[in-house]
Image (spheres, grey):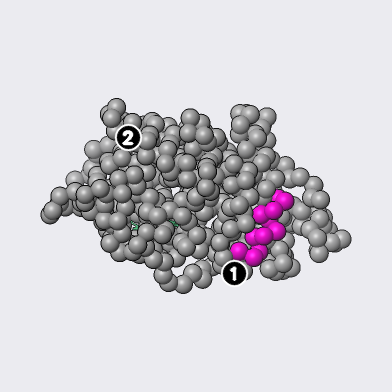
Amino acid sequence: MNTPDQPMFAPKAWKLTTQQAELTALARQLGQDKFADRAYQWDQEASFPTANYKDMYAAGLMGICIPKQHGGKGADLLTYALTSAEIGRYCGATALTFNMHVSSCLWSGPLADDLDMDHDTRQLHDQRRSLHYQRILETGAIYAQPFSEGGAAAAGSQAFETIAKKVEGGWIVNGKKIFASLAGYADYYGALCTEIATKGQTPSRANTMYLAIPATAKGVSVEGPWDPVGMRGTVSRTLIFNDVFVDENAPLMPPGVYFQAAKRWPHMFMTLTPTYMGLAQGAYDFTVKYLRGEIEGTGPTKRRQFATKQMAVAQMRIMLEQTKSTWFQAMSEACPNPSKDQILRAWAAQYTTMENANEIAQLAIRTCGGQSMLKTFPLERMYRDSRCGSLMLPWTSELCQDMLGKGCLYESGESDT
Ligand SMILES: Cc1cc2nc3c(=O)[nH]c(=O)nc-3n(C[C@H](O)[C@H](O)[C@H](O)COP(=O)(O)OP(=O)(O)OC[C@H]3O[C@@H](n4cnc5c(N)ncnc54)[C@H](O)[C@@H]3O)c2cc1C
């Protein structure tokens, strides 16, 4: 029996709500008791963590962001993020794929409730989303979130090339999504497409549709290999939609609402960070235990007595505290129409989390030493998994820096020409 790990965000110190304290404790227990030991297998085989999903379903976590009136836990972004970070601490691939699933509920749920819709549209949305939520809560359906296409659309600067053509009773979808985490394992693919409602209409970002495409629908296929450096258990293969028909209940958001969300609720793009916040904590935890001689198979030698290692752990702890504080603050500020200052802070927090997770993991390997990077230990996997964070669109580290630099120096409408 393991000694239970301390919370990443101690409820009293971080002023967590009762629900936040309970959900994070649940995730931590699952992570430590079950996910940590299984993580090697998913990574080694590049296979999907099916067993972890069964446990998360049994624990009620699959409906974490489904509104309470629809039978879910009604968690907001911060509550979800804190819970997911505890999962990422033990298995990065489980936390990252969990993010894709949860985002479908968070965006169609609490986030959509904050956005503008007329009365009839809101009613229809409520009816449609209840179907998605029932599938998740009653039959354990898993939702994926394939947006990326390899071009500028996932970066937010052009319309998606996956097209949803309006037809009688629904849409016909054609397109290709790369890096579709959960490919072959999800029951529904929550794909972003550009709706073409009338013949000859020019594709526009304003007409982005967020459609749940059944994995079993005719014309859906998964192709290509999946053998990446990290996050191997996400199984992010390529998805092809070839004349796939989806019916009127497929939208996870009404037409136009995703576009509104991307503009008015920008913290929606921070949902990828909890995984990496957890990885940063995991790499730090490992280092402390390793240097204290507490990791099975490395003891009883202690390494903590060396001043250089103490300095390195201090540096890691400073980075970890900086990351946690910035991340927690930005997450807790998520709301519709944030101020410019809040958006700049969100970009800074995204950058900090994604970059520091990998920096902390590499410091951990350097500090612990040669044996620590053997595959018998989780550290080298954390190092590889954490490398992926800064690549995730639309808020890659590069794009965050780019937007921050411009945002700090220019006010809306200003130019130098
Ligand atoms: C482990 C893992 C899991 C993933 N899972 C999913 C998933 O489930 N769903 C999903 O949708 N995606 C997922 N992704 C994809 C991810 O979000 C990115 O879309 C992907 O990594 C981009 O790869 P790329 O080589 O096309 O990137 P890039 O070439 O870096 O970017 C693609 C395009 O974005 C624009 N762009 C990039 N950088 C800049 C810049 N600095 N300035 C201006 N424009 C820029 C350019 O138009 C460029 O052609 C995953 C990625 C990883 C690593």
Q: Main secondary structure of the magenta part?
A: helix
Q: Residue at x 64, y 65 (%)?
A: 41
| Residue furthest left as drawn | 200
Q: Is residue 388 above or below residue 13?
A: below
Amino acid bearing label 2? Leu
Position of residue 45 in the picture relative to residue 206 (left or right): right
Residue that carries the numbered disc 2 in the rendered image:
124
Q: Is residue 1 above or below residue 81?
A: below
Depth-wise, is mark 2 or mark 1 nearer the camera? 2
Q: Residue at x 43, y 72 (%)?
A: 224
* Residue 362: image location, x then y, percent: 62, 60
Q: Earlier in the sequence, mark 2 or mark 1?
A: 1
Chain part drawn in magenta = 32-42
* 398 falls in the magenta region: no
How dense is the environment of label 2, judged by Cα within 10 Å: few (below 14), some, or many (20 and up)? some
Amino acid bearing label 1? Glu
* Residue 397: image location, x then y, percent: 44, 53
Q: Is residue 400 above or below residue 337?
A: below
**Gap in angstroms between the C-alphas marked 2 and 1:** 43 Å
* Residue 214: image location, x then y, percent: 40, 55
Position of residue 3 in the picture relative to residue 168 (left or right): right
